[in-house]
Amino acid sequence: MSLKISRSLWWFFMLCGLLIQGQERYKDSLFSNIQMKTFTYADTLQLDFYSPKKDTVQKRPLLLLVHGGGFASGKKDNPLEEEFCTQMAYKGYAVASISYHLTRKGKSFGCDCPAEEKVTTFRTATEDVLNAVNYLVDRKNTLKIDPRKIILAGSSAGAEAVLNTAYMHFHHDFKDLPFPNDKFAGVVSFSGAVLSTDYITKETVIPALLYHGKKDKLVPYKTAPHHYCEPNAEGYLVLGGSYAIAKKLALLNTAYILMSDPEGNHDWANLAYRRTDEISNFIKDVILEGSFKQSKIHLAP
C-alpha cells in the first residue's frame, strides 16, 4: 500500500514539474499568493505595491500603473486597477498603482480650460509619476526591482501621464523634472496621447503597446485637438494620439503594437484592463527580450 502511495506521489510531482517547466515567468500566472503594501511616496500621495509572496527573484521588472479620471477623479485601488495589478503580479511582476494630484478636481478640463492650464496639468502628473518611480528605485533592493526594467502603464488621463513621462523628457515644460538615470523600458497606454510627437526622438524613443478606439471623442486617436476643441477655444491644444505615436515609432524603427477598434470610443480606457495576457506577452517578448515587432491590429471589445 505504501509503495503505491509513493509511486502516486512520484507521478504527481513529476506532472507538476512538467507543468511548471511549460510555463514562462512574466507570461503565465506562476504565483497564487500576492502581497500588497501601501507606501506614501510624496506628501500625502500613496502607492500600492503588489508582488508575489515567496518570490526568490531579486531583480524583477516593475510595472507602474496610473489610473484615469480626467485628472479630477479615480483612485489607485478601484476594482479595475486592483484586478489588473493582481493579475500582473501573478505572472511575477512587481506592480505599483499610484495616486497623484487630481489638479482638475472641481474644475473643467474641456474646451473652456485654457491650454496652458492643460499643459500644467500634464506636467504635474508627470512630476508625480517620476517622484513615485524615484521612491521605488531608491528602495530597489528591498522591493527587489530592476531599475533598468521599468514599464509605465496608464488609462485615459493616466495614459496621457505615462506617455508624456515616457516621451516628453526634453519638452521645455518637462525638461527640469526629476527623470531617473535609467531610461524607461517601455510604455503601455489605454486611450492616451502626448503633447507632441515631435519630442519622440532617438534619445527618448521606447517600445509601446497602444490601445485606442478610433471614434474616441475625448482623447484623439490621430493628431487632433484635445476634446476636439475649436481653434478659437481657450482649451485648444493639439495632441498626438496612439496612431500618431505608432507612426513616429515606425519612422524611428522602434517596436510597437497599435491595438485599435474601428468602432470603439473612449471605452478602451477601461476595456484594455482585461487584456493582461496580451500585455504580459508584449512586455516579455518585446520589452524584456528585445523581440522586434511593428503591428497594427484591429480589435473588438
Image (tube, helix red, strand yellow):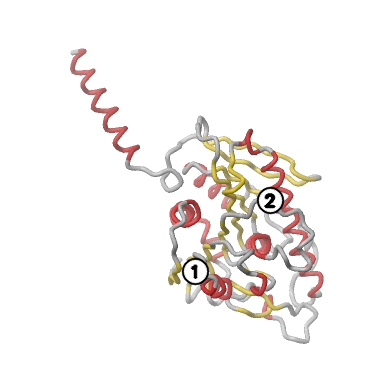
Residue 258's label in the rendered image is 1
Q: Quadrant of residue 232?
A: bottom right
Left or right placement of residue 137 versus residue 13 in this view? right
Quadrant where the N terminus is found in the figure:
top left
Q: Circle 2 sits in a helix, a strand or a loop, which is it?
A: loop
Q: Is residue 208 above or below residue 197?
A: above
Is residue 249 something that shows in the picture?
Answer: yes
Residue drawn at x 81%, y 75% as measured from the top left: 114
Q: Are marks 2 and 1 in contact (CB under 8 Å)?
A: no
Q: How many marks?
A: 2
Tell me where residue 40 appears, x and y as whole percent.
74, 41
Callout 1: few (<14), some (14-19), or many (20+) C-alpha neighbours within 10 Å?
Answer: many
Residue type, mark 2 in image: Asn
Residue 181's label in the rendered image is 2
Residue type, mark 1 in image: Leu
**Residue at the outermost top position:** 2
Residue drawn at x 68%, y 51% as measured from the top left: 181
Tell me where residue 8 appears, x and y as whole percent.
22, 23
> Which of the two marks, 2 or 1, is nearer to us in this view?
2
Q: Quadrant of residue 48?
A: top right
Callout 2: few (<14), some (14-19), or many (20+) C-alpha neighbours within 10 Å?
Answer: few
Is residue 105 something that shows in the picture?
Answer: no
Q: Quadrant of residue 25?
A: top left
Between discs 2 and 1, the one toward the N terminus: 2
